[in-house]
């Protein structure tokens, strides 16, 4: 009976945090909507481009290569962060961790070679 009570208590804690995670942002957004000043006018609804009157459509189509290039940078930047804790704890980890890290780096190099082959890294 005691084990069942502990088991149910664990789910109760998860449920409470789930409710808080949903309710707190919802309440904060609702209070922000109630408390904000709201006085729309034609001048406030116009687009603003550095004090210049807009003369064309504000939706400009960008080349998707720039986004892919930035995404590749973020991926490799974040993945290299994983190398730091491994390097700090290398003495304690041993040969098995070295093999795992080599596999990890080889996978990154395969991804880099694939991106290079697909000309994702070409800027223009």
Image: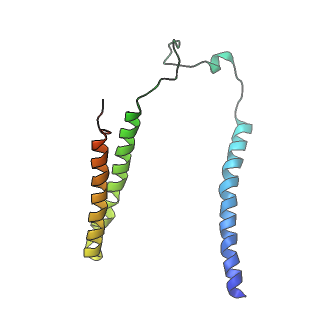
Say if 84 sits above or below 37 in the image.
below
Q: Position of residue 83 (x, y in %)?
A: 31, 60
Residue drawn at x 67%, y 79% as measured from the top left: 7
> How many numbered marks have been drawn onto this rendered protein structure?
0
**In-image side of 44 versus 90 (left or right):** right
Could you tell me residue 39's position as x and y percent? 72, 24
Percent x, y of residue 48: 54, 19
On-image quarter of the C terminus: top left
Quadrant location of the N terminus?
Answer: bottom right
Q: Residue furthest right?
A: 34
What is the basis of the colouring in this image? Answer: rainbow
In the rendered image of this protein, does residue 100 appear above or below residue 22? below
Residue drawn at x 48%, y 23% is 60
In terms of depth relative to the viewer, which is nearer, 28 or 82? 82
Q: Quadrant of residue 104?
A: bottom left
Vertically, is 56 above or below 71?
above
Left or right: residue 110 compared with residue 19: left
Camera-nearest residue between 7 and 25: 7
**x and y, in percent, of residue 57 in the image:** 53, 17
36 relative to 21, above or below: above
Residue 17 figure quarter: bottom right
Q: Residue at x 30, y 39 (%)?
A: 121
Q: Is residue 1 left or right of residue 96?
A: right
């Amino acid at each position: 009976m005691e084990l069942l009570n502990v088991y149910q208590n664990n789910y109760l804690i998860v449920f409470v945090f789930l409710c808080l995670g949903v309710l707190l942002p919802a309440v904060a957004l609702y209070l922000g909507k109630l408390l904000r000043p709201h006085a729309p006018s034609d001048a406030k609804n116009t687009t603003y481009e550095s004090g210049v009157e807009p003369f064309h459509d504000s939706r400009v189509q960008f080349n998707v290569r720039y986004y892919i290039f930035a995404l590749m940078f973020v991926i490799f930047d974040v993945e290299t962060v994983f190398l730091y804790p491994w390097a700090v704890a290398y003495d304690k980890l041993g040969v098995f961790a070295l093999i795992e890290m080599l596999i990890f780096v080889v996978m990154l190099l395969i991804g880099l070679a694939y991106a290079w082959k697909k000309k994702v890294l070409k800027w223009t």
